[in-house]
Amino acid sequence: MSAQPAIAPDLPRAAVIFIDAALEAGAAILEFWRNGAPAQSKADGSPVTEADLAANSIILDRLKRALPEIPVISEEAEQPEAARGAEWFILVDPLDGTKEFLRGTEEFTVNIALIHRGAPVCGVVFAPAMGRIWTGCGAKARSGTLAIGATDAEEIAWTAIGCRAESEKLIAVVSRSHLDKATQDWLARNDCGGSTPSGSSIKFCLVAEGAADAYPRFGRTMEWDTGAGDAVLRAAGGRIETAEGAPFVYGKSHEGYANPGFIARGKARGGP
């Protein structure tokens, strides 16, 4: 395991590092997206493309140079023990929503998150084909727009975002590729007023910016799938818990960094 930082990382600096890494990785992904990137199957049956691997290389190289003292767990790197017992570590999903990417849709993202004592404290979600980026750092959440293919952070037009108070009739956002019976049952039990399908970690960001009230997910996800979006959500005033109502934590190395089912939500009705 890498040595842990003697003092807490500077969160605003970490956010800048994550943004720059995500922009460069996103530009590389777009080249494959426009020209096609054949997929192969990993051991778990999920798809991986050259775009995933190229983005992963870019991000890991930047993190190694900028934050060498913090261990990194990436979907596309074999580092199962890297964060065991670590107070601080980074989660990377270099291309979240590979199925959407392969279909030619725009709903794929680059995810980078900083975890401290089991909770995401800084994260970046970048949707390069949409020209949208979201960040959550501490208690500050923002969304940004930029020209598609841009790699200069100075070109981002930022807007502060925050969750809305839940509607009487919940509006949910659900997985476009993984809408299962458990999710449909949850929507029915909670008398939702509607649900919108979306891909990748964008679903967290839609709740964070007040476009939806909840994101229920009961199928298998991994910590790198959720960390960055969860950071944005929490910074925007939202919360996430397991399907049983327990706290949602990170660093589950003994479970291979797999997540339980969860519900991500905006502000409670009547709350501050």
Image (cartoon, rainbow, N blue to C red):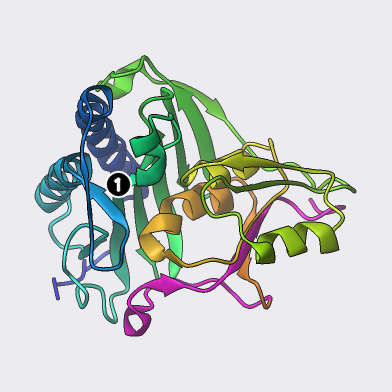
Q: Is residue 216 magenta?
A: no
Q: Secondary structure at mark 1?
A: helix
Residue situated in front as seen by the camera: 134 or 220: 220
Q: Which residues are magenta?
A: 245-272
* Residue 97 visible in the displayed image: no
Q: Is residue 249 magenta?
A: yes
Whole-percent x, y for residue 60 in the image = 15, 50
Residue situated in front as seen by the camera: 236 or 97: 97
* Residue 52 visible in the displayed image: yes
Residue drawn at point x = 21 percent, y = 29 percent: 32
Q: Amino acid at mark 1?
A: Ala
Residue drawn at point x = 72 percent, y = 58 percent: 184
Q: Which residue is mark 1?
A: 14
Residue drawn at point x = 37 percent, y = 82 percent: 255
Whole-percent x, y for residue 114 in the image = 35, 57
Quarter of the image with the N terminus in it:
bottom left
